Amino acid sequence: MKNEQILRTSRSGKKKFKIKSSAGYVVFSVFNVIFITLLTFTFIAPYINILAKSLNAASDTMLGGLTFWPRDWTFDNFWRFLPIPPRGRVCWSL
């Protein structure tokens, strides 16, 4: 039954047909998923880096070596641009 339809019966008694996947299709599917995952990471990584830099202290960011996780967490970079009154800042400080 190579590359033929396999007959299966469901609980309701209806017959379903399933087409067997060839080895080439499976290999293509695996490499396609890997490629799309790497491509997605390539497009998302710069945004994660910018977010990490914006949540890091300015003096620590200038030292360099920051990738995807801030070393010195702070929201001070956002307080300069967001018009939040000083009382609201107490809730957000870390």
Image (cartoon, helix red, strand yellow):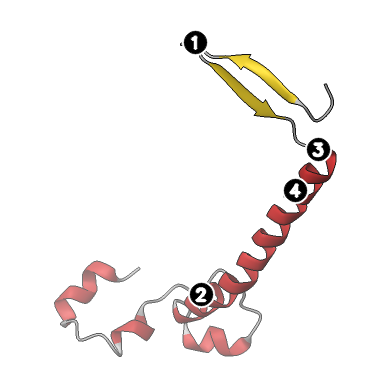
Which mark is on residue 11? Answer: 1
Numbered label tally: 4
Residue of label 2: 52
Helix or strand or loop: what does disc 3 sit on?
loop
Q: Residue type at mark 3: give it.
A: Ser
Q: Residues within 10 Å of mark 4 (few under 14, many from 20)?
A: few
Quarter where residue 38 is shown: bottom right
| Residue at point 45%, 81% (across, down) | 54
Sooner in the amino-acid sequence: mark 4 or mark 2: 4
Residue of label 4: 30
- Do the CB atoms of the residues marked 4 and 2 lie less than 8 Å apart? no
Q: Residue type at mark 2: give it.
A: Ala
Q: Calculate the distance from the C-alpha at mark 3 to the C-alpha at mark 4.
A: 13 Å
Helix or strand or loop: what does disc 1 sit on?
loop
Residue 8, percent from left and from top: 63, 16
Q: Residues within 10 Å of mark 2 (few under 14, many from 20)?
A: many
Left or right of 9? Residue 88 is left
| Residue at point 77%, 27% (across, down) | 4
Q: Calculate the distance from the C-alpha at mark 1 to the C-alpha at mark 2.
A: 52 Å
Q: Residue type at mark 1: give it.
A: Arg
Residue 71, percent from left and from top: 54, 72
Which mark is on residue 22? Answer: 3
Left or right of 68? Residue 58 is left
Q: Calculate the distance from the C-alpha at mark 1 to the C-alpha at mark 3.
A: 27 Å
In the rendered image, the quadrant that contains the C terminus is: bottom left
Residue 71 seen from this side: no
- Residue nearer the viewer, 64 or 4: 4
Helix or strand or loop: what does disc 2 sit on?
helix
